[in-house]
Image (cartoon, grey):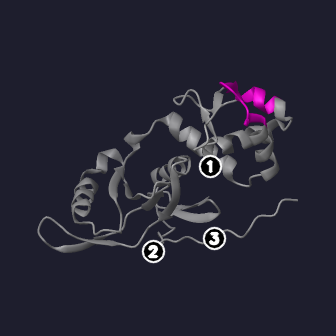
Amino acid sequence: MDHFPPTLPTLASRLPALKSRSSCRGFTIHRNRVLVFESHLELMVIWLLAAMPEVATIVDQPPPVPYLDHAGVERTHTFDFLVTMRDGRRLFIAVKPAKRAGKALIVAKAIAAQLKPGIADEVHVVTDAAFTRTERHNAALIAQCARFPVTEHDETIDRITARMTGAVRIGHLVETSGLAGMGFRAIIRLVGSGLLQPVATRQRLTTDSYVVRRPSI
């Protein structure tokens, strides 16, 4: 039987009200830590970030940032996420629907111009126009397969693909592993970790997709 460590609590500086008549609010799990969200779009962005191997950590609802608005009035703003990349860069991310992103862009520009060293390196506004349905599908699949991983299965796929040259169909890797559906989940986890890379990045991940082994850095 597999045993998993207790899920770590959110690092959020504030928690969203769970009752809402007009929005989707809740939480998801990333690397065994709770991340809260205030909309379905925020959840999609969490999954998209989690699927990027270059992302090291995601902090939800980081502490508010002070800034001066266009009238010189001091205000504070709480970003949806603070993302740390593996190269050390820190990114503030605000998530808004494209049709309502105008104000968020103004606030983000003001904060970016006033950021003190060490708080963050970049400020971004991410909208639903920033990704496709296929990217959203693949990110959701990676997030689903990342829950309750089986280390032995991941190690099996790692061994099989260690000396792989060229592109191989996911279905063939599943058959070679003898793990059936659990082998597919392990392959998707290795795609999420960056060990394997899809050949066709604009197509949904299925057993007919081809992947290559990424070179070690």
Looking at the rendered structure, the kind of residue marked 3 is: Leu
Residue found 63% across the figure and 70% down from its top:
8
> Toward which corner of the image does residue 9 lie, by quadrant?
bottom right
Separation (CA) of disc 1 from disc 2: 24 Å
Horizontally, is 152 left or right of 35 in the view?
Answer: right
Q: Please tell me which residue lies in front, 175 or 79.
A: 175
> Toward which corner of the image does residue 5 lie, by quadrant?
bottom right
Q: Quadrant of the N terminus?
A: bottom right
Q: Which residue is mark 3?
A: 8
Q: Which residue is mark 1?
A: 143
Question: Pointers 1 and 2 in contact (CB under 8 A)?
Answer: no
Instruction: First in sequence, mark 3 or 2: give its number.
Output: 3
Work out which residue is located at the far left of the displayed protein and give it: 71
Q: Which residues are magenta?
A: 160-175
- Name the element at disc 1: helix
Q: Position of residue 203 (x, y in %)?
A: 56, 28
Q: How many marks?
A: 3
Looking at the rendered structure, the kind of residue marked 1 is: Ala
- Above or below residue 22? Residue 69 is below
Instruction: First in sequence, mark 1 or 2: give its number.
Output: 2
Instruction: First in sequence, mark 1 or 3: give its number.
Output: 3
- Name the element at disc 3: loop
Q: Which residue is mark 2?
A: 13
- Per the rendering, the mark at residue 126 is none
Residue found 59% across the figure and 45% down from its top:
140
Q: Please tell me which residue lies in front, 204 or 192.
A: 192
Separation (CA) of disc 3 from disc 2: 15 Å
Queried whether the magenta region covers residue 194, the answer comes back as no
Looking at the rendered structure, the kind of residue marked 2 is: Ser
Q: Quadrant of the C terminus?
A: top right
Horizontally, is 173 left or right of 121 in the view?
Answer: right
